[in-house]
Amino acid sequence: MLRLFRYRISWSQLAWFGHRLSGIGVLVYLFMHIVENATLAFGPGVYDTTQTFFRNLPVRLGEIVLMAALVYHSLNGLRVIAMDFWPATTRWYRPVTYAVIIGTIVAMIPLGLIMITPYAPWNGR
Amino acid sequence: MAIGRTIWPVQGDPLRRNPSRAARPRPAEPGFERWMWYFTRISGLLLVILAMGHMLIMHVLVQLTGQEISFAFVTSRWGTPFWRIYDLLLLVLALLHGVNGARIIISDYIERGGLRSLLIGILLVITFVWLLLGIFVIITFNPVGAPAIGPFS
């Protein structure tokens, strides 16, 4: 249990809420991604110019958040599928939920470092 | 604060309990809602591979190999049917999976029938338009025939 805004929230409630939040976030991105990709229909000039709008730090940070949301949603989703079809696995509900959260953080360390590289101090900026 | 609902443990059919504490247990009666329950899980399994693969190629591998996403990059990728079918499958599955999730979230938080139907109706209309747009872009992409229009051409 952890205390948040004077409420006592269990990690399992937070895991559930995180699944919804990451899902909505990825869906909103998908809608924008479809619009952005539609510029392909206007030829290389329009598409390549549009792409230059996305080559900056704020967009890259957003992409890292998107990656984290997708990694978390994937790992937690696999846990949901396993426990829905093999209810016996709920015996390990708590350790698996912690593993999903820790797994997301661990996976995001190399992924985040690779993705931030062009804007990082160690890249000569 | 009760985020989520206390629906576990429930006696009876093990699948109707909600041991995974997902959004909902498997709907009791066969029909649309049960189909969508299965669709979400099966498409989710495929999307772990499709979406993670897509992200790893476009955001990690492209970075590691020092490439940039440009019209030429898309041309070389979509020159092979494999990646077009891959992206088409990813688009359709991700959009339907995500919109069904959004529909369930709307149903959970909006109690009033009229407002709920209105919001879900708007969601479905937008989804239909965006789905057609996405499919259109992938299928009709043709680097040779692309029109030279617009201010940047």
Image (cartoon, coloured by chain):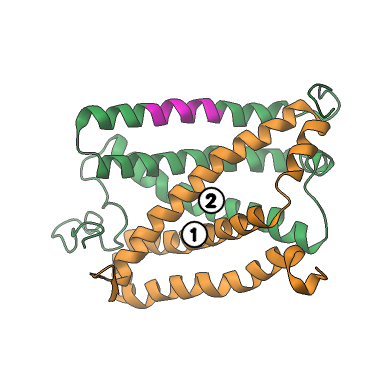
Chain colours: A orange, B green
Q: Position of residue B40 (x, y in %)?
A: 41, 47
In which image quadrant can residue B71 be found?
top right
Crowd tier of the residue under label 1, counting other residues whose Cα lies within 10 Å: few below 14, some 14–19, many 20 or above? many
Mark 1 — on which chain does it sit? A
In the rendered image, the residue lying farthest to the left is B11
Give how far apart the Cα atoms at labels 1 and 2 are.
Answer: 8 Å
Would you place residue A60 above or below residue B102 in this image?
below
Q: Secondary structure at mark 2?
A: helix
For badge 2, the amino acid type reads Leu
Q: Secondary structure at mark 1?
A: helix
Span shown in magenta? B122-131
Disc 1 target residue: A74
Q: Position of residue B76 (x, y in %)?
A: 83, 42
User: Seen in the image, is B57 located left or right of residue A71?
Assistant: right
Q: Residue sitting at 61 percent across and 34 percent down?
A: A35
Q: Nearer the viewer, residue A122 or B108?
A: A122
Q: Residue sitting at 44 percent across and 61 percent down?
A: A78
In which image quadrant can residue B29 be found?
top left
Quarter of the picture holding the C terminus of chain A: bottom right
